[in-house]
Image (spheres, rainbow, N blue to C red):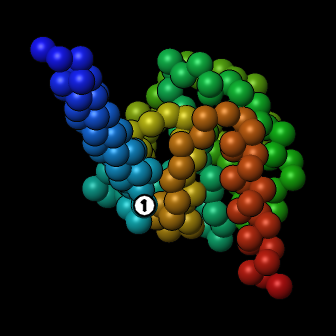
């Protein structure tokens, strides 16, 4: 085989592998994008007789941080929530949703901690830690993965600023 033919064959194989890798990456990005919007518009409920769920606050919006017991990032996110909780307007509040019945992290009293497994499963986002914004009727309006305390801070500060602009 001539060197030129071998080079063309090798380059063709590499180009095909590159296209296959890009197709796989594109598919994964689409899956993650769909997962981000999973749960938006869903009314959370813990049972058939439940009118409003444990996450909803009458007359306010709840920013729910969904964590699990095996999450190494969750401590950083919870510390950021503790810092942010004192600066929130009255109609915004934090709640922590944990799958750990022995959840014992030190958080300010203004942050509600919910350890109900049924509520944890009802908040069906496929990632943790996650931020869910729940209105007073228990309807999820926004979900987002929260990979760090800084990410949570950025999302919450942006939401508070947007809320202030709408009130003006």
Q: Which class describes the residues within 10 Å of circle 1: few (<14), some (14-19), or many (20+)? A: some
Q: Residue at x 61, y 35 (%)?
A: 147
Considering every residue shown, the one lying at the far right of the view is 87
Give residue 120's quadrant in the image: top left
Q: Nearer the viewer, residue 19 or 73?
A: 19
Measured along the vertical axis of the image, is residue 18 above or below residue 164?
above
Read off the residue under disc 1. Answer: 40
Q: Does dot 1 land on a helix, a strand or a loop?
A: loop
Give residue 146's quadrant in the image: top right
Q: Residue at x 35, y 50 (%)?
A: 30
Q: Position of residue 4 (x, y in %)?
A: 24, 24
- Judge whether residue 20 can be spotted in this image: yes
Give residue 162's quadrant in the image: bottom right
Image-based side of 41 in relation to 134, left or right: left
Image-based side of 31 in relation to 78, left or right: left
Q: Position of residue 111 (x, y in %)?
A: 71, 42
Q: Residue at x 59, y 19 (%)?
A: 72
- Judge whether residue 138 can be spotted in this image: no
Image-based side of 52 in relation to 107, left or right: left
Q: Position of residue 95 (x, y in %)?
A: 63, 45
**Which image quarter is the N terminus in?**
top left
Measured along the vertical axis of the image, is residue 3 above or below residue 158?
above
Considering every residue shown, the one lying at the far bottom of the view is 168
Q: Position of residue 32 (x, y in %)?
A: 39, 44
Considering every residue shown, the one lying at the far left of the view is 1
Q: Residue at x 46, y 64 (%)?
A: 139
């Amino acid at each position: 085989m001539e060197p030129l033919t071998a080079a063309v064959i090798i380059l063709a194989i590499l180009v095909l592998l590159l296209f296959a890798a890009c197709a796989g990456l594109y598919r994964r990005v689409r899956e993650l994008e769909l997962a981000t919007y999973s749960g938006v518009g869903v009314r959370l409920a813990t049972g058939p007789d439940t009118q409003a769920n444990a996450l909803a606050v009458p007359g306010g919006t709840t920013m729910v941080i969904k964590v699990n017991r095996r999450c190494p990032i969750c401590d950083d996110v919870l510390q950021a929530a503790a810092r942010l909780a004192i600066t929130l307007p009255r109609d915004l509040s934090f709640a922590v949703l944990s799958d750990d019945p022995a959840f014992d992290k030190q958080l300010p009293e203004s942050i509600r901690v919910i350890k109900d497994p049924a509520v944890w499963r009802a908040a069906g986002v496929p990632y943790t830690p996650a931020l869910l914004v729940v209105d007073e009727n228990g309807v999820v309006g926004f979900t987002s993965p929260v990979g760090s305390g800084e990410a949570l801070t950025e999302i919450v500060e942006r939401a508070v600023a947007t809320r202030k602009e709408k009130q003006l």
